[in-house]
Image: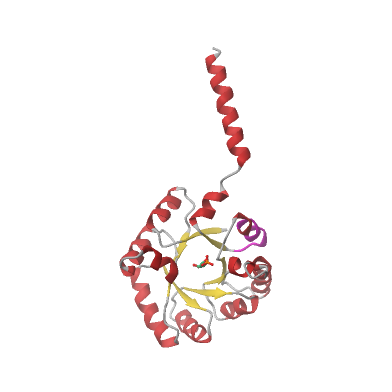
């Protein structure tokens, strides 16, 4: 399973890259706006820093606007993936972008039926938002499981990119289902490596070693 970082923050990207866990980055207008400053400069820096796909989202809501923006966004780097919302106009844009060989990520996906449409039209990635569904008492991961079945049934090449991740259980379940990619907030990546028994075990090893050295 590939790990993308769900952020537009350069320090977070650098740190996860240093951990060796960075396969790509996803951004969205909210994440970009949190960083402030010139978004174009920020997008260019992210694309340069990341050795992997970087999703940059369109703002337009018509096919024409999305295509125009997509042409601009791909100029930021060879690794740009254009993020398109799951709306009718988005699907029209998706078809055209796929034909032009531009990589796409269909975002704001909340049902397996929506994912089926993205897969059928040849999206590179489809992003089911599991945390937002969980927040409404609908199982986000159950939907991802159904998407996996549908995509396997038809040998779709579209990758399932689990998004809106809230905690390590989403990561575990994504792995069990066989999601292709998961995009994680920085805090969740850091949580993944933590276990109280690891800390306790390490403290005991070090204390025993120190006692042994002192007893020599
Ligand atoms: C995905 O690409 C989105 O950027 C992101 O996962 C949205 O998640 P949120 O529900 O935390 O905003």
Q: Quadrant of residue 117?
A: bottom right
> Looking at the image, which is closer to me, 42 or 98?
42
Query: Does 21 sit above or below residue 76?
Result: above
Residue 83 covered by magenta stretch: no
Tell me: 182 left or right of 46: right
Q: How many marks?
A: 0
Q: Residue at x 57, y 31 (%)?
A: 203
Q: Quadrant of residue 48?
A: bottom left
Q: Quadrant of residue 118?
A: bottom right
Q: Identify the main secondary structure in magenta.
A: helix
Asked if residue 213 can be seen in this view, the reply is yes
Query: Does 163 sit above or below residue 167?
Result: below
Question: Looking at this rendering, what residue extends furthest in the front direction?
Answer: 136
Work out which quarter of the rendered image holds the C terminus and state it.
top right
Q: Residue at x 60, y 38 (%)?
A: 198
Query: Does 189 sit above or below residue 128?
Result: above
Counting from the top left corner in percent of width and height, residue 159 is at 56, 69
Residue 177 covered by magenta stretch: yes
Part of the protein shown in magenta = 171-179
Counting from the top left corner in percent of width and height, residue 44 is at 33, 65
Q: Residue at x 43, y 48 (%)?
A: 18
């Amino acid at each position: 399973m590939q790990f993308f970082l769900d952020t537009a923050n350069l320090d977070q990207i650098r740190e996860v890259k240093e951990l060796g866990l960075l396969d790509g980055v996803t951004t969205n207008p909210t994440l970009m706006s949190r960083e402030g400053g010139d978004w174009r400069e920020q997008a260019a820096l992210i694309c340069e820093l990341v050795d992997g796909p970087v999703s940059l989202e369109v703002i337009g809501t018509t096919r024409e606007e999305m295509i125009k923006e997509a042409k601009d966004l791909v100029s930021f780097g060879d690794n740009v993936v254009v993020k398109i919302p799951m709306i009718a106009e988005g699907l029209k844009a998706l078809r055209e972008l796929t034909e032009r060989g531009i990589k796409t990520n269909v975002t704001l996906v909340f049902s397996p039926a929506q994912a089926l449409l993205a897969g059928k039209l040849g999206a590179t990635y489809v992003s089911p938002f599991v945390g937002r569904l969980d927040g409404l008492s609908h199982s986000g991961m159950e939907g991802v499981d159904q998407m996996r079945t549908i995509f396997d049934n038809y040998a779709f090449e579209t990758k399932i990119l689990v998004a809106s991740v809230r905690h390590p259980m989403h990561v575990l379940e994504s792995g069990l289902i066989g999601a292709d990619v998961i995009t994680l907030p920085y805090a969740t990546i850091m949580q993944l490596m933590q276990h109280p028994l690891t800390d306790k075990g390490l403290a005991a090893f070090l204390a025993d070693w120190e006692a042994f050295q002192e007893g020599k």
